[in-house]
Amino acid sequence: MKILDYILDLVYPTRCVLCRRFLPPGRPSICPACQGRMPQTEEGFGRKGDFFSRCVSALYYEGDVREAIQRFKFQGAQAYAVPFGELVAQVIYERMEGEYDILSWVPLDAGRRRSRGYDQAELLARNAGRRLRREPVRVLKKRRGVRPQSNTGAPEKRRANIAGAYRVIDPAAVAGKRILLVDDIVTTGSTLSECAKTLLLAGAEDVRCATLATTR
């Protein structure tokens, strides 16, 4: 560890991203206790959607995981993207290695990204890509003015809300390709399905997804 990093760790101690306890300098961002009790999905876990062939997730969206993701998305905790991206990379490597050509993510619209200061799904994809030695490629753009899915309610309302929200940036780049989309959470799967439909209509061969967390 660099001397400056060591001093910064002493002045600004690292906290576990899940339980928020202080960690000794140089320790991973998730403490051993939380690593042992993280609600990890089962090895064979996978969800199918209307247009994506499979979605794998690292964790279940509950307890400390849920609170940590809320801090990551809405409270400026960008640094969480490093340990969270590693979890996404691990689940991709273990359950989808060799099953995709392009690594990408589900984008925020420009207005929400500007107000938040970052796109959490892009951060996850880029940090996962570093571990996987794959450079993520932006393939989708989201139009402005779409109501957040978390505030929409029932599954049918979510599907209606997100319909037509995305477009493919360069159809030639995705034609005949197997796309792997990264996102933070999957609940009903309506957002991932809409993204997958948009990519398939542009000529993609297959769309698969990987998320940090999923509801049970």
Image (tube, rainbow, N blue to C red):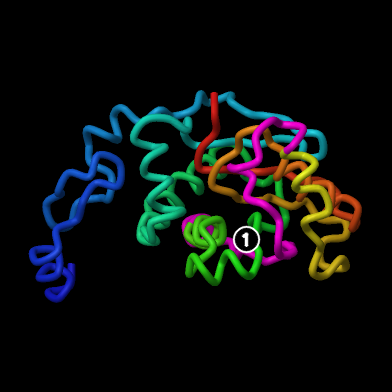
User: Which quadrant: the C terminus?
Assistant: top right
- Looking at the image, which residue is at 59% across and 49% down? 183
- The residue carrying mark 1 is 108
- Residue 82 seen: yes
Tell me the crowding category of disc 1: few under 14, some 14 to 19, or many 20 or more residues within 10 angstroms, Cα based: many
Looking at the picture, how far across and down is residue 118, in whole percent? Answer: 50, 67
User: Which quadrant: the N terminus?
Assistant: bottom left
Range shown magenta: 128-157
Q: Residue furthest bottom?
A: 4
Q: Compared to 50, does 8 lie above or below?
A: below
In the image, is 49 to the left or to the right of 61?
Answer: right
* SS at badge 1: loop
Front residue of 62/125: it is 62
Which amino acid lies under the numbered mark 1 shown in the image of this protein? Leu
Numbered marks: total: 1
* Residue 38 lies in quadrant: top left
- Looking at the image, which residue is at 80% across and 42% down? 160
In the image, is 76 to the left or to the right of 160?
Answer: left
Q: Compared to 97, does 4 lie above or below?
A: below
Residue 48 shown in magenta: no
- Residue 133 seen: no
Looking at the picture, how far across and down is residue 210, in whole percent? Answer: 60, 43
In the image, is 62 to the left or to the right of 146?
Answer: left
* Residue 136 lies in quadrant: bottom right
- Looking at the image, which residue is at 22% across and 37% down? 32
- Looking at the image, which residue is at 30% across and 41% down? 18
Looking at the picture, how far across and down is residue 58, in whole percent? Answer: 49, 37
Q: Compared to 189, does 85 lie above or below?
A: below
Residue 141 shown in magenta: yes
Front residue of 154/20: it is 154
In the image, is 136 to the left or to the right of 35?
Answer: right
